[in-house]
Image (spheres, helix red, strand yellow):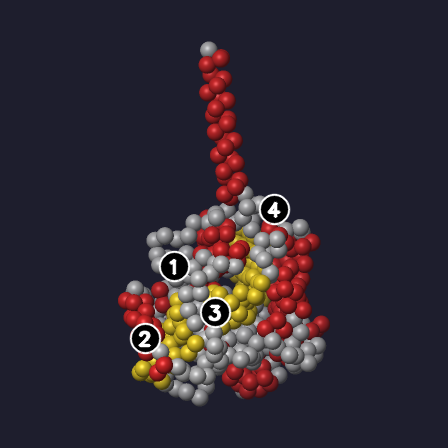
Amino acid sequence: MSRTLFPVKHSFLILLTALSSVATSAYGHEERPNVIVIFCDDLGYGDLGCFGHPTIRTPNIDRMAREGQRWTQFYAAAPVCTPSRAGLQTGRYPVRSGMCGFGYRVLFPDSKGGLPQSEITIARMLKDAGYSTHAVGKWHLGHLPEFLPTSHGYDTYFGIPYSNDMDTSKNAPPWKAQFADPKSEYWNVPLMRGESIIERPADQTTITERYTQETINLIRRKRKQPFFIYLAHNLPHVPLFVSKPFEDVSIRGLYGDVIEEIDASTGRILNALRDEGIAEDTLVVFTSDNGPWHMYRQQGGSAGLLRDAKGSTWEGGMREPTVFWWPGHIKPAVIMEVGSTLDLLPTFAGICDARLPSDRTIDGINLKEVLLHGEGDGRRELVYYHGDEVFALREGPFKAHFKTKTEFVGQQDPVVHDPPLLFNLQHDPAEKYDIASAHPKVVERLLARKRAHEAGVTKVPNQLILR
């Protein structure tokens, strides 16, 4: 009888070993990288050394770009904060989650809305795949408990829940004076850990330093299991603040000081990965939520050669300086394929062996083949939303503008273009030369693509107007 049972038991052990091997391949830490997203606020396309700024020193991000991939045509999901962050977190145009609209274009401290619980964030997706998940910094997807990161798949949260210029103190001087000589006490923004406020007003002079240290501590504590860290800086959104070691270090002035501190922060985070021996096990993405805030002049950044800035659907409002870094896995290169923060969720699903949500429309695409092999077809479609309206659409090199509105100042109502404006962004990234009359079939095709996209969108209640 023992001779009969032994083969059965032995076969069962072989099966268990095989299943364990499969599980290790599919879900083991070695096969699934850690992921860190470093997300700036209002960083312009031309604000980094590796993207052409002549007087801001960014040696750490420049090195990151040399060792990784510098993407020259990478876009935010929207031209302002809240919808842009909703798009990154969900891989979906923010119109699908109600996180965009007119009247109120972002969430404020008196808002009662936020990212709906029905949405699946990157954190929730990766948590289901066995990752530890952590949010550090600016959230801006709802400050009430049901909307905070800890209610959207993040194990921990440390940061300011909305923009650093909100919730102005009653004792603050007049508006212009606030920004001429900013002090933390002029804004009553809270610093939170989890769902609790631990400091109010937050000392913004040390906020980049504290976000950096929190991220490094997480790397050291969580290094033995796969982790996802979403580090969203509150800066260089005004008001501008730096810690003591970075005061007056940049020849660009205060704005340059802020960028150079973020650069140093990025270098420390990458060094922490090297020190812990997990640099080759970690994918790091550096990008921003929208273009520079030109309204604040020298306290705002630069879109480089691109047209316009934050708040507009011209290139300067949505094309962002972006770097992907994953030593030993992605070949260093300058990538001219079109990418978007919408693509991060499906890309992480593909790279981290996580289950992509199948019960909803995901607007982003998986960039894995481009990252690992440099392969792309160059025919990407991208929709530019202003509020909950399609203002522009890109397909391949061509971009059509159906409506335009310049950033935040000087123009009250959008201009309707009939026929649409048309630009070849590969030839004319500054959008100077309208070529619609020479390409009527292209215009017709992009109009048809716009109508097809709009027909596939079911608008949901606007979360931004809830009070």
Q: Where is residue 22 in the image (x, y as percent from the top left)?
A: 50, 38
Label 3 or label 2, whichever lies nearer to me, is 2
Q: Which mark is residue 462?
A: none
The quarter in which the C terminus is drawn is: bottom left
Which tag, 3 or 2, sits closer to the chain's start? 3
Residue closer to the observer: 190 or 450? 450
Label 2 or label 4, whichever lies nearer to me, is 2
Q: What element carries label 1?
A: loop
Q: Name the residue under label 3.
A: 75
Q: Residues within 10 Å of mark 1 (few under 14, many from 20)?
A: some
Q: Is mark 2 on a helix, strand or loop?
A: helix
Q: What residue type is labelled 4?
A: Lys
Q: How many marks?
A: 4
Label 1 or label 4, whichever lies nearer to me, is 1
Which tag, 1 or 4, sits closer to the chain's start? 4
User: Which residue sits at x=65%, y=65%?
Assistant: 63
Q: What element carries label 3?
A: strand
Q: Mark 2 points at which residue?
A: 441
Look at the numbered discs 2 and 4 and tell me whether their residues touch, using CB distance below 8 Å. no
